[in-house]
Image: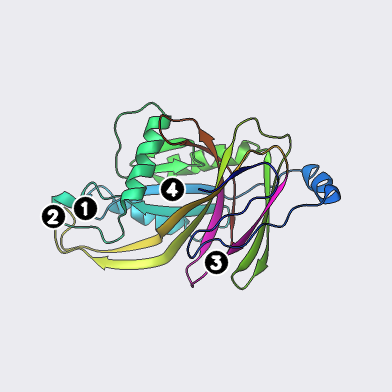
């Protein structure tokens, strides 16, 4: 991640973000800071694995909610079940590390699949639709102090962030890329013989900047390639070596 800031931010991650952020003028800062936040879509993260026999129902639930505009559904495939005989081609160690960081933030010692994290806050193990809907409704009913506005297009975007009231704890700005659909024939492991459909499979998750939330800020983002992208602003709690993920305060689709 790059630079802790209170005003403008800048960062560069290959294929995700490039270019300096334009500073806000004093009138812009005053006007932006007074804007009320707008309800962001609720981010639902699914930690899953093709090597987990309990995961297909959760994967199917993910596919069902993926088209919804009030939700940003993101499937993160973890690698700790690969030893069972099927190496998940979508799994990344970074996604396992993210799930472990959520567990540490909650004081838990174990991680599970399938697990959903709703809004960076509520964890659901082996989630079913009623529990997920209740968690999404709960997250949507909790007002966030952070507003987000995305402008631009054709791979060039400007992201404006503001907090009203100002934040007392720092945040991490993240850009996520994902593949909307995938179908995989599982040849070995617990799901051998199944052909499974997946939705919104995360391919890259980059922390691009830190923002302390005390003043409005602007970030210029260059998105390369055809995969959709979203931006997520998330609380960062102190950890022993790296910050731990907290509540997601704002999110928006870029493309």
Label 3 – label 1 distance at C-alpha: 32 Å
According to the picture, the residue beneath numbered tag 3 turns out to be 223
Residue placed at 77% from the left, 52% from the top?
A: 24
**Tag 4's secondary structure?**
strand
User: Measured from the top left, where is residue 223 in percent x and y?
Assistant: 55, 66
Query: Magenta segment, which residues?
Result: 216-232
Viewer-nearest of discs 4 and 3: 3
| Visible residue check, residue 5 | yes
Label 4 – label 1 distance at C-alpha: 18 Å
156 is higher (above) or lower (below) than 242: below
State yes or no: residue 168 in magenta: no
Badge 1 or badge 2: first in the primary sequence: 1
Label 4 – label 2 distance at C-alpha: 25 Å
State yes or no: residue 218 in magenta: yes
User: Measured from the top left, where is residue 152 in percent x and y?
Assistant: 68, 67
User: Measured from the top left, where is residue 151 in percent x and y?
Assistant: 69, 63
User: Measured from the top left, where is residue 11 in percent x and y?
Assistant: 57, 55
According to the picture, the residue beneath numbered tag 2 turns out to be 85
Label 2 – label 3 distance at C-alpha: 36 Å
According to the picture, the residue beneath numbered tag 4 turns out to be 45
């Amino acid at each position: 991640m790059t630079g802790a800031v209170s005003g403008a931010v800048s960062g560069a991650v290959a294929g995700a973000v490039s270019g300096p952020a334009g500073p806000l003028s004093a009138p812009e800062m005053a006007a932006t800071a007074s804007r009320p936040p707008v309800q962001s879509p609720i981010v639902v993260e699914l930690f899953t694995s093709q090597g987990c026999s309990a995961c297909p129902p959760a994967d199917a639930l993910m596919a069902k909610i993926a088209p919804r505009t009030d939700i940003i559904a993101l499937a993160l495939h973890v690698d700790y079940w690969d030893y069972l005989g099927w190496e998940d081609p979508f799994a990344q160690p970074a996604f396992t590390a993210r799930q472990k960081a959520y567990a540490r933030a909650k004081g838990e010692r174990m991680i599970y699949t399938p697990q959903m994290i709703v809004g960076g806050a509520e964890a659901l193990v082996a989630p079913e639709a009623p529990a997920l809907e209740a968690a999404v409704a709960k997250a949507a009913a909790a007002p966030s102090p952070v507003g987000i506005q995305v402008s631009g297009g054709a791979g060039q975007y400007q992201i404006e962030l503001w907090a009203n009231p100002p934040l007392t704890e720092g945040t991490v700005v993240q850009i996520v890329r994902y593949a909307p659909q995938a179908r995989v024939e599982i040849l070995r492991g617990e799901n051998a013989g199944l052909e499974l459909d997946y939705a919104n499979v995360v391919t890259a998750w980059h922390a691009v900047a830190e923002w302390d939330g005390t003043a409005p800020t602007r970030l210029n983002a260059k998105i390369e390639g055809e995969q959709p992208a979203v931006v997520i602003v998330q609380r960062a709690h102190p950890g022993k070596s790296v910050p731990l993920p907290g509540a997601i305060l704002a999110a928006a689709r870029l493309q």
